[in-house]
Image (cartoon, rainbow, N blue to C red):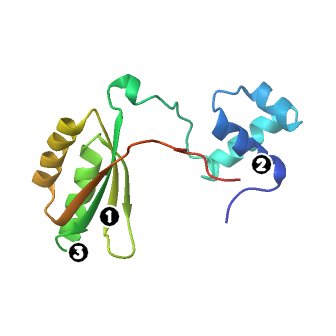
Amino acid sequence: MTEITDKTDLSILELLQRDATLSIDALAAEVHLSRNACWRRVKRLEESGVLIGRVALVDAAKLGKGLMVFVMMRAADHTPEWIAALDKAVKSLPEITGAHRMSGDLDYILRVQVADVPDYDRFYKRLLALVPVRDISASFVMENIKDSTAVPI
């Protein structure tokens, strides 16, 4: 069960998703609460696990990592050992910014951020050295139309 009690909690979450640098004073003013009441709500949302972190978003292209790639994989097998190897590979390769086990034809989709195609090729070879796959393919993002971390509220 979530620890969201009312629309004010939802407003706090929506505002923090937009700008996690908001001070408690600014957040309290936006949701029409006292500073202390707002701070208590934020703490409760953190302690309950609804609010799991606050991060800064960066422009990948300005850091030389402007190519996003979606890697579709089919597992070589589904043993606990293979799954552990994939988990270890995902955690050890910083280029992987998202990893998802899927239903349907694909077993896994990885979101990968690299500099360019040669950089992706180096990543690809490192990934395959860490975990065998039955099938793997990649799609390169041509244009980011929408790319958000915000959960709809």
Point out the residue furthest to the front here: 142
Amino acid type of the residue tagged 3 in the rendering: His
- Residue 21 lies, in percent from the top left, at 64, 27
Q: Mark 1 vs mark 3: which is more N-terminal?
A: 3
Q: Is residue 16 shown above or below 133?
A: above
Give me the residue at 71% from left, 57% from top. 3
Nearer to me, 35 or 105: 105
Amino acid type of the residue tagged 2 in the rendering: Asp
Q: Which mark is residue 108?
A: 1
Labels 1 and 2 touching (C-beta < 8 A): no
- Residue 57 lies, in percent from the top left, at 51, 32
C-alpha gap between disc 1 and disc 3: 12 Å
Q: Is residue 13 shown above or below 33?
A: below
Q: Nearer the viewer, mark 1 or mark 3?
A: 1
Amino acid type of the residue tagged 1 in the rendering: Tyr
Say left or right for 6 vs 48: right
Q: Which residue is mark 2?
A: 9
Labels 1 and 3 touching (C-beta < 8 A): no
- Number of residues whose C-alpha sits closer than 10 Å to that of mark 1, classed few (under 14), some (14–19) or many (20 or more): some
Give me the residue at 82% from left, 47% from top. 8
Question: Which element type, helix, strand or loop, lies under badge 2?
Answer: helix
Question: Which element type, helix, strand or loop, lies under badge 3?
Answer: loop
Residue 123: which quarter of the image?
top left
Nearer to me, 45 or 12: 12
Give me the residue at 83% from left, 30% from top. 35
- Residue 140 lies, in percent from the top left, at 32, 47
Q: Which residue is mark 3?
A: 78
- Number of residues whose C-alpha sits closer than 10 Å to that of mark 2, classed few (under 14), some (14–19) or many (20 or more): some
Say left or right for 133 vs 13: left
Residue 76: which quarter of the image?
bottom left
Q: Mark 3 vs mark 2: which is more N-terminal?
A: 2
Nearer to me, 142 or 68: 142
